[in-house]
Image (tube, rainbow, N blue to C red):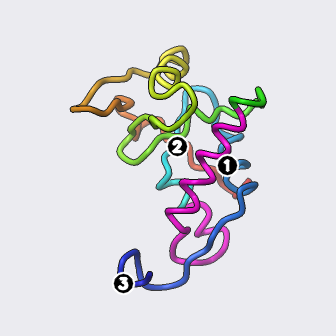
Amino acid sequence: MEEKICEGKMVIPAPKEVMKIMEKIPKGKVITVKEIREVLAKKHGVDIACPLTTGIFIWIVANMAEEEKKNIPYWRTLKSNGQLNEKYLGGVEKQREKLEEEGHKIIKKGKKYVVVDYEKKLFIPTPFP
């Protein structure tokens, strides 16, 4: 694992930790998987949060929120480079609709949809929720 991802210590986060971050993203802001992983690594005092499990837990939280009508703004969580997540329930169409309702501009780059200037709208929770 160290050869492929990084050297050092890695945390496998709990799903509730991922959900707590996603719950805190305010309207008009977004976060990417990268920032969620950085926050988790910092919280646990390690070098990296597992990209695989963090991504799976984001997907689980998003789908649970949609299915159970929970008040978790999962659509504000983007993939790397500001890409919309086609794996959320309703696909990119639903995520795009929700983001545009909040004032974000979405464009198509190749086959992917991205939030324009997402870097300027990043939410970084501090201290850890």
Secondary structure of the residue carrying numbered label 2: strand
Badge 1 local density, few (<14 within 10 Å), some, or many (20+)? many
> How many numbered marks have been drawn onto this rendered protein structure?
3
Q: Is residue 53 magenta?
A: yes
The reply to whether discs 3 and 1 touch (Cβ–Cβ < 8 Å) is no
Q: Position of residue 38 (x, y in %)?
A: 53, 62
Q: Amino acid at mark 1?
A: Ile
Q: Residue at x 37, y 23 (%)?
A: 106
Residue underneath mark 3:
3
Q: Earlier in the sequence, mark 2 or mark 3?
A: 3
Quarter assignment of residue 24? top right
Secondary structure of the residue carrying numbered label 3: loop
Badge 3 local density, few (<14 within 10 Å), some, or many (20+)? few
Q: Residue at x 43, y 34 (%)?
A: 84
Residue underneath mark 1:
21
| Above or below, comparing residue 22 to residue 67 in the picture | below
How far apart marks 3 and 1 lie (CA) works out to: 28 Å
**Tag shown at residue 31:** 2
Q: Residue at x 46, y 37 (%)?
A: 85
Q: Position of residue 88 (x, y in %)?
A: 54, 35
Decide if residue 69 is on the left or right side of residue 60: right
Of circles 3 and 1, the one toward us is: 3
Q: Is residue 106 magenta?
A: no
Q: Amino acid at mark 3?
A: Glu
Decide if residue 35 is on the left or right side of residue 82: right
How far apart marks 2 and 1 lie (CA) works out to: 9 Å
Quarter of the picture holding the N terminus: bottom left
Dominant secondary structure, magenta: helix
